[in-house]
Amino acid sequence: MNEVRYAGFWVRFVASFLDTLFLAFPVAIAIYFLSDGNWFDFSQYQQNISYAMSGNAQKALAVQPQTSLKWELLFEVSVLIVTMLFWRRWRGATPGKKLVHIKIVDAGTYEDIDNKQAITRSFGYIVSAFTLLIGFIMVAFREDKRGLHDLLAGTAVVYDDCI
């Protein structure tokens, strides 16, 4: 095994952005159409953007679009399942991670993660987000570049050429 190189904040940020484009966005489009437009009130989003662009932020924030919890849960579960399928198929990588040559591994053995770690890590994203994003930001300051979700799941993100 070569020397382990941990993936830092910015490369992980780019990978997450790419995964939003390649995974979450297509799933969102499919679920929006499956819901027959009932997932959320797109016209209200457009109205709010119009208010915000005209400088009327107060009016833009006054009425928030209604969403369907049923369709929102389907979206979240679908993204989780698709992500886990990629982790399984591509040994700890998603399309975004694959493009920037990083992957998720067990923090102790540097082997592929198991389903328990994948699920824990996915739910750990919620914890990382609810801590005012500190769970994600800590990646920039830790020597091992692990976020709160990594610590909870016992995972690390490394460059794939070092394993």
Image (cartoon, grey):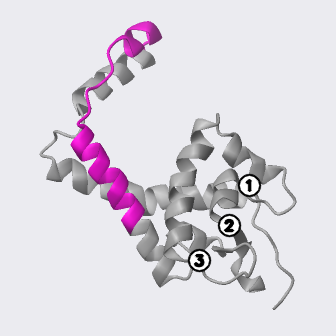
Q: Earlier in the sequence, mark 2 or mark 3?
A: 3
Discs 1/3, front: 3
Q: Which mark is residue 154?
A: 2
Disc 1: which residue = 9
- Residue 5 x/y as whole percent: 82, 74
Q: Residue at x 64, y 34 (%)?
A: 132
* Mark 1–mark 3 CB contact (< 8 Å): no
Disc 3: which residue = 113
Q: Name which quarter of the figure residue 84 lies in.
A: bottom left
Image check: 110 left or right of 39?
right
Q: Name which quarter of the figure residue 49 lies in.
A: top left
Q: Looking at the picture, which amino acid does disc 1 mark?
A: Phe
Identify the residue at the far bottom of this view: 1
* Mark 2–mark 1 CB contact (< 8 Å): no
- Magenta highlight: main SS: helix
50 part of magenta stretch: no
Discs 2/1, front: 2
Image check: 58 left or right of 3?
left
Answer above or below: position of 49 versus 72. above
- Residue 64 x/y as whole percent: 33, 21
Of helix, strand and loop, which one carries label 3? loop
Cα–Cα gap, marks 2 and 1: 18 Å
Cα–Cα gap, marks 2 and 3: 9 Å
Q: Residue at x 51, y 53 (%)?
A: 123
